[in-house]
Image (cartoon, rainbow, N blue to C red):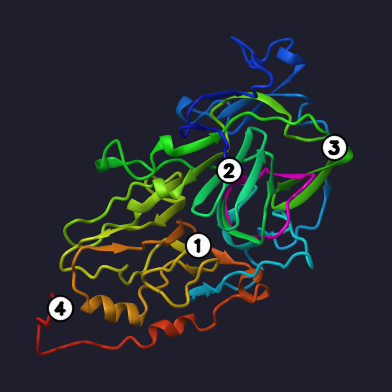
Amino acid sequence: LCYMQYISGLGNECASEDPRCPGSLPEGQNNPQVCPYNLYAEQLSGSAFTCPRSTNKRSWLYRILPSVCHKPFESIDQGHLTHNWDEVDPDPNQLRWKPFEIPKAPQEKVDFVSGLHTLCGAGDIRSNHGLAIHIFLCNTSMGNKCFYNSDGDFLIVPQKGKLLIYTEFGKMLVQPNEICVIQKGMRFSIDVFEETRGYILEVYGIHFELPDLGPIGANGLANPRDFLIPVAWYEDRQVPGGYTVINKYQGKLFAAKQDVSPFNVVAWHGNYTPYKYNLENFMVINSVAFDHADPSIFTVLTAKSLRPGVAIADFVIFPPRWGVADKTFRPPYYHRNCMSEFMGLIRGHYEAKEGGFLPGGGSLHSTMTPHGPDADCFEKASKAKLAPERIADGTMTFMFESSLSLAVTKWGLKTSRCLDENYYKCWEPLKSHFTPNSRNPTEPN
């Protein structure tokens, strides 16, 4: 479990064979009349065939049986998974959630799929435009079940408990402070080892990519070499009539039965794969003179819209780093944003709100809703000596930011019973320091 092999590099054209079947990749072509080891060739397309080469995504899988070998799909209960953004009236208030409660085992066994809860989102699945933010709360492994998403990509952020993820491309172990992306259409199953919780950013119709670096240059932020892709691994396992394939299609869940494990891919090649990334590898860029650089410098992955420079979704982190800015209020400043900002906490505490913002919880500051440091943070930072200091050691906060105006679900506002009704009170102690007769107040340094 501790040692797993990976291929390095985001977006690479990769090839992998399970070592038990050397030479299982066809030579010189994708679809021979008879594949090595009498395997079936199957293409998984993540883009239109006619996309420019730079954005064309596809992989060829060589498998014991093709994925078409299943009984018809039938609708199943979708629990708290939804894409209905009109369940409750819009709420422009600053919203904060206490840590989402994980069901207790063995009283209530909940796996990854049944533990999906949609918190907020926007857009339309059928037109391939939009996103959803989900919370997963589970305590048991999926067993003879797998899941695939016909609607979009999942960016999974575990907060408590590690995930052993079986995919058609191989296995990944993803622990808190790591992330993984399972792209549209890829079948996967998740084993857990304890009560487990995390966050998911789902984007429709587009894929995550590294942000452009512009004047930063060729290096920095998340580097491609640090993204890891699983190596081929297969199981030739019969489950007569007992393996369940769950599909999310147009926001609904469907299930089909089949006789074999779907993880029967002996070899594969291509550039459309799942991948993982350790957030500790992020190369932080920061201000070294005065003022703040915009938090876009902390973007790990982005899902671009058709408008240049505007994202459907960005995944942003606030990792441990040095703060050295002179004559500067160092915590995040007060802000109103045309974007929507959902924040989550993996571990530790967040510098701007050390009290009520806890690991496993979250906050949402919607389009143009004001937010910023609480009163205690403001008072401390306004008087602090501005020596070089370590910021956020032992912590990891992240943000899902979107150009879309996000609607919160009924589960998020009511059913979860985790909404902090007193969040607004953290700003009530703020008081006026206005000195109309003195332009230059005393500075602490």
| Between discs 2 and 3, the one toward the N terminus | 2
The Cα atoms of the two marked residues, 4 and 1, are separated by 40 Å
Which quarter shows the N terminus? top right
Residue under label 4, please give it.
444
| Between discs 3 and 4, the one toward the N terminus | 3
The numbered disc on residue 268 is none
Q: Amino acid at mark 2?
A: Cys
Q: Tell me the element at label 3.
A: strand
The quadrant in which residue 188 appears is top right
Residue 231 at x, y percent in the picture: 59, 30
Judged by its main secondary structure, the magenta piece is strand
| Between discs 2 and 4, the one toward the N terminus | 2
Q: Are marks 4 and 1 in contact (CB under 8 Å)?
A: no
**Which residue: 79% across, 31% down?**
68
The Cα atoms of the two marked residues, 2 and 3, are separated by 31 Å
The magenta segment? 128-155
Residue under label 3, please give it.
258
The numbered disc on residue 405 is 1
State the residue in front, 254 or 353. Answer: 353
Q: Amino acid at mark 4?
A: Pro
The quadrant in which residue 274 appears is top right
Q: Residues within 10 Å of mark 4 (few under 14, many from 20)?
A: few
Q: Does 441 sit above or below residue 360?
A: below
| Between discs 1 and 2, the one toward the N terminus | 2
